[in-house]
């Protein structure tokens, strides 16, 4: 395992000199032996991926079935609306909480909502909505801690690869969960609950971020634990020092918006239960390949400057938005809420099934490319753990605002075509608004002034592991 990590380190740090951006920093000697394996960024990102494999990955497996595979889609839509409403509110402040409590503790606190939410599927629809609201608070903590660590641990030349590694492991949760649900005819909620409970304790095995050294010898800067007042002030400092982040807000808003149509209004509406399970399986499987493709082969391409990679990623995602939605439009225009019924649902043996399942595969590609590119753009703006936590909080908050609104719209039975059209419009608008940020803000390497929160709050000088 140690040899594999060393080889991956050599591959990941092979970017151009102008992409390193870390030559200005103090260089530390990396630990050797078992400590070198334990404190290796790839191992820690892998553990982070396993946490999300066990917790949100299992929830994704249930959500992707439409109606959680057990309750009707209206109940799940209302639960998801409650989830994302609380997620949106607490997500805005979750970067502050992360910087005060530390990423590892924030991550562990965030995991507890997932087993509670899955357990609610065993209890009934009333508790599902309440559990969704609680999960929103926990998810804000988990995803903020996750995002800040995922973008802070790699060097600038490795960020696409690290995001791809995390996204692949995380989406294995959806793949495995979907396979289990499909194979057991959905009597698998208890198994999902056990896996999420295991995931709660995995953060205890992870290293403290302030003891982490990147592949190029630079140390991950962990912000000292400041006062709540100072951290709340840092929210405004982050916006003032880097206002370009505002141009990513529409992209953030749309980043979970499309799940409602995909899972409830397409997968949950026109397929049989058996077909939903298989669709869910191929959807999360395609996410693994999509994130690795854009992260490693496009965004981390060592032969290209970072700005060129940014434009390449933007064009790829923007093109996928139109390919997928034009394709989906020809299906959506054939059914409405009034015309769908169990008698006409598509099964895996139906002649129309192959074409329809390919749309789910391409939606999986689009989702993983969208999320990977969004994280990569944030990571291109800074290497400072505190600033990345704040930006991730913005990301998850706005993402949840969009999701809360559209899940509620689905819960009150807004026409399928209206939901589809708004999804297409928002995803296209999100990419168009992001383009000026890509053009003017993304540089070939991160400048010292991009670490503004680090300079304001100060850093705790902690010796690296020996």
Image (spheres, rainbow, N blue to C red):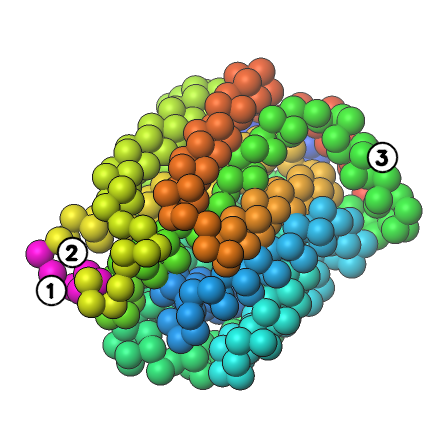
**Secondary structure type for disc 1:** loop
Residue receiving disc 3: 456
Tell me the quadrant of the picture where the C terminus can be found: bottom right
93 on left or right of 123 = right
Left or right side of 429 for 351? left
Residue pointed to by mark 2: 353
Q: Position of residue 348 (x, y in %)?
A: 16, 64
Q: Earlier in the sequence, mark 1 or mark 3?
A: 1
Residue 98 occupies quadrant? bottom right
- Residues at circles 1 and 3 in contact by the CB criterion of under 8 Å: no
- Residue 263: image x %, image y %? 38, 56
Q: Secondary structure at mark 3?
A: helix
* Labels 2 & 1 near each other (Cβ < 8 A): yes
Q: Secondary structure at mark 2?
A: helix
* Residue labelled with disc 1: 349
Q: Quadrant of residue 443?
A: top right
The segment highlighted magenta reads 345-351
Residue neighbourhood size for the residue with mark 2, other residues' Cα within 10 Å, grouped as few (<14), some (14–19), many (≥20): some
């Amino acid at each position: 395992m140690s040899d594999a990590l060393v080889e991956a380190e050599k591959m990941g740090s092979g970017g151009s000199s102008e992409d390193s951006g870390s030559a200005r920093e103090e260089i530390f000697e990396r630990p050797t032996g078992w400590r070198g394996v334990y404190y290796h960024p790839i191992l820690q990102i892998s553990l982070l991926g396993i946490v999300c494999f066990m917790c949100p990955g299992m929830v994704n497996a249930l959500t992707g079935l439409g109606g959680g595979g057990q309750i009707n889609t209206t109940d799940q839509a209302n639960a998801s609306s409650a989830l994302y409403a609380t997620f949106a509110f607490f997500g805005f402040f979750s970067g502050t909480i992360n910087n005060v409590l530390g990423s590892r503790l924030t991550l562990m606190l965030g995991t507890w909502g997932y087993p509670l939410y899955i357990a609610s599927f065993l209890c009934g629809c009333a508790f599902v909505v309440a559990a969704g609201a609680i999960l929103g608070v926990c998810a804000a903590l988990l995803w903020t801690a996750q995002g800040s660590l995922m973008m802070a641990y790699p060097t600038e030349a490795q960020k696409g690869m690290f995001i791809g590694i995390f996204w692949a492991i995380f989406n294995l949760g959806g793949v495995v969960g979907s396979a289990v649900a499909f194979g057991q005819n959905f009597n698998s909620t208890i198994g999902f609950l056990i896996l999420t409970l295991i995931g709660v304790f995995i953060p205890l095995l992870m290293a403290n971020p302030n003891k982490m050294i990147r592949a190029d010898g630079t140390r991950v800067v962990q912000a000292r634990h400041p006062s709540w007042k100072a951290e709340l002030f840092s929210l405004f400092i982050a916006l003032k020092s880097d206002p370009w982040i505002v141009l990513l807000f529409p992209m953030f808003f749309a980043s979970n918006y499309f799940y409602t149509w995909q899972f409830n209004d397409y997968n949950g509406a026109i397929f049989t239960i058996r077909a939903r399970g298989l669709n869910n399986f191929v959807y999360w499987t395609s996410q693994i390949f999509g994130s690795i493709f854009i992260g490693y082969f496009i965004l981390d391409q060592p032969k290209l400057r970072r700005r060129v990679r940014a434009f390449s990623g933007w064009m790829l995602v923007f093109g996928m938005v139109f390919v997928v939605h034009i394709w989906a439009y020809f299906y959506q225009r054939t059914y409405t809420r009034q015309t769908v019924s169990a008698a006409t649902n598509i099964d895996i043996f139906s002649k129309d099934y192959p074409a329809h399942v390919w749309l789910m595969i391409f939606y999986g590609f689009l989702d993983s490319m969208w999320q990977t590119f969004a994280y990569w753009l944030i990571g291109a703006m800074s290497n400072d753990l505190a600033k990345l936590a704040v930006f991730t909080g913005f990301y998850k908050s706005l993402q949840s605002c969009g999701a809360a609104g559209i899940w509620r719209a689905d819960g009150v039975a807004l026409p399928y075509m209206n939901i589809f059209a708004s999804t297409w419009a928002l995803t296209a608008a999100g990419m168009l608004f992001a383009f000026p940020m890509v053009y003017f803000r993304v540089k070939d390497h991160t400048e010292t002034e991009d670490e503004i929160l680090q300079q304001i709050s100060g850093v705790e000088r902690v010796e690296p592991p020996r």
